[in-house]
Amino acid sequence: MAQEEKKTIVIPHAAPALVSGNKETIRTHKKIVAIGRLAREKRFDHAIKAFSKIAKNLEGVTLEIVGAGPEEANLKKLAKDLGHVDRIIFHGYLSDPQPVLEDADISLVTSEFEGFGLTILESMASRIPVVGYAAPYGPQALIQHGKNGLLVKDGDQEQLAGEMLRILTNESLWKKCVEGAKKTAKKNSEKQWRKNWLDLHKKMS
């Protein structure tokens, strides 16, 4: 007896509305943001260590971390030990991280694993390229290397630092990735999300 074919359809989260206006004109190439729960699997320590490697080459650059969690004290100590307590800003949990995202230049994703990656979509909807580890699922599904951000070998802090420095100092690459981020956000818009559900409903009717 032939086995019944199983079909799976994935409809991912919708991205937030694309930030309006020409935000690119106010970017300074000095602000990096990382958002998430401050837990060990999110590897914010990698973000801090990679930032430390490039801070000496970029005067005035800052890393702003949004989130709370059990690793907060350890991460603050790490920032202090590396001598960047004044350049690594901990915002704690914010119900609306949009104000922090809006004038950032790049977003970091350093998790061991991610789902679809709503934080990635939030960043791209704010016209921010994402630099992240090529962890399974979310980052690999959303980040197109050199088009809307940069993918880094999972766990490679040296490469992470190098790619952060590259996109922050290469205006043409950054602008290209900004445009790509906007396209990815539009592709995953709420309008498209609704259409995907309606199309699925029609197929099942």
Image (tube, helix red, strand yellow):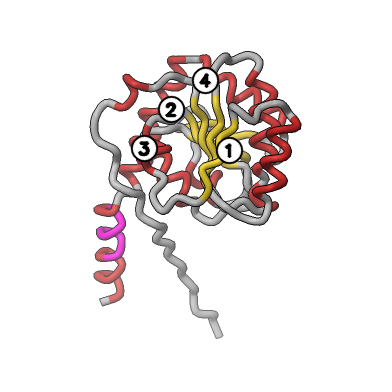
Rounded to the nearest angstrom, the CA distance separating label 1 from label 2 is: 13 Å
Residue at x 25%, y 58% (from the top left corner) = 195
User: Do the residues bearing badges 4 and 2 touch, measured as CB atoms within 8 Å?
Assistant: no
| Number of the label disc, if any, that sits on residue 82 | none
Earlier residue among tags 2 and 3 = 3
Tell me which amino acid carries mark 3.
Answer: Ser
Position in image of residue 38 (x %, y %): 62, 51
Quickly name the residue at label 2: 177
Tell me which amino acid carries mark 2.
Answer: Cys
Quadrant (top left/top right/bottom left/bottom right) for the C terminus: bottom left
The answer to if 27 sits in the magenta stretch is no
Earlier residue among tags 3 and 1 = 3
Mark nearest the camera among 1 and 4 is: 4
Tell me the crowding category of disc 4: few under 14, some 14 to 19, or many 20 or more residues within 10 angstroms, Cα based. Answer: some
Up/down of 103 relative to 69, above or below: above
| Number of the label disc, if any, that sits on residue 126 | 3
Q: SS for tag 2?
A: helix
- Specify the segment rendered in magenta: 192-197
Task: Give the overall secondary structure of the magenta segment.
Answer: helix
Position in image of residue 116 (x %, y %): 49, 54
Quadrant (top left/top right/bottom left/bottom right) for the N terminus: bottom right
Quickly name the residue at label 4: 168
In the drawing, does residue 83 fall left or right of residue 205? right
